[in-house]
Amino acid sequence: MNSAPPESPLPSRVAPRCALAFAVLYACYEAPEGIGGRLLGSFAVTAVLMMLFHAVAWGVGRWLGYRNGFHAYALEWRPSALARALAVMLVLKPVSVLVGVALGVMSVQPLEKPQVGTALLVAVLGVAVSTFVPSLAEDIVARGFWFRAWPVAGQGVGYVALSAGVFVLTHVYRLGNGPLEWLMLFCTGLAYAAAVARTGSLWGAVGLHWGWNLANGLLDLQWDVNAVGQGGRWLSAATGLVALGLVVLLPKRRDSTV
């Protein structure tokens, strides 16, 4: 089946309109951490602003001419794309940590008082939600927008490179950590963008991205996981490239069953 969007409105192809749309999305994505976290130091404000981002994203998509605003970002529901990518990363991330421990670039110690029972279940649900919402928001800004609403670099290799670069820039508050941080983000961004290109759906990237963040959160519920020096960044960059390889090797599926 053709993976083209259900509607391809002319206004979304006009560069000034698309540039303004991206500026709004980017500003609204950075606001939760910048205003809620760094300026006000309020988790509640951060959470509210992050939820509001998705309303803004839908409105921007509508403004670009899509009947369903989220279709501007290739977000038609594709549960199997989400599930496959999520499963891949929920396995790959713990394996990466184990490799890091073996190489001496990661340290893992059990928590003195890990949560159990109902408290653990509630914590797992909380981690799932708190990692999904920002992951999806960033995927809209760094990947979905450039794949569907403004595909200035196409939907192949050029798109993957552009998207990975934008992914680095969405981490504006971490750019001061230096080139190795940029490299780590770029390598990871390549895998996420390739998942969109392979499936024709943003849900492929969401699965990988959410899986990475979810796995980190779940590990932290039971273990004290820390990087040794710069080793964690190198390991994350390598894991991103491994994920990219897995995405490239998987069969290309861009139909309604994805």
Image: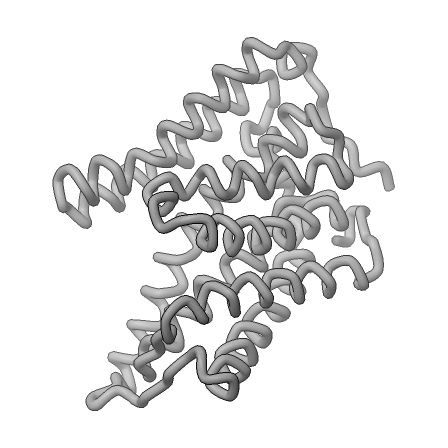
Q: At 62% across and 57% down in the image, what residue appears?
A: 82
Horizontal arrangement in the rendering, residue 151 relative to residue 183 (left or right)? right
Quadrant in the rendering for residue 89: bottom right
Figure colour scheme: one colour
Q: Number of callouts in the render? A: 0
Horizontal arrangement in the rendering, residue 23 relative to residue 164 (left or right)? left
Q: At 37% across and 71% down in the image, what residue appears?
A: 229
Comparing 166 with 212, the one in front is 166
Comparing 4 with 243, the one in front is 243
Which residue appears farthest toward the right when viewing the image?
1
Quadrant in the rendering for residue 127: bottom left
Residue 180 position, x and y percent, is 47, 54
Q: At 44% across and 53% down in the image, what residue appears?
A: 181
From what the image shows, is residue 100 above or below residue 253? Answer: below
Residue 166 position, x and y percent, is 53, 36
Residue 129 position, x and y percent, is 38, 58
Q: At 64% across and 54% down in the image, what residue appears?
A: 191
Residue 104 position, x and y percent, is 45, 84
**Quarter of the image where the N terminus is located:** top right
Comparing 214 with 158, the one in front is 158
Horizontal arrangement in the rendering, residue 171 relative to residue 32 (left or right)? right
From what the image shows, is residue 127 above or below residue 111? Answer: above
Quadrant in the rendering for residue 38: top left
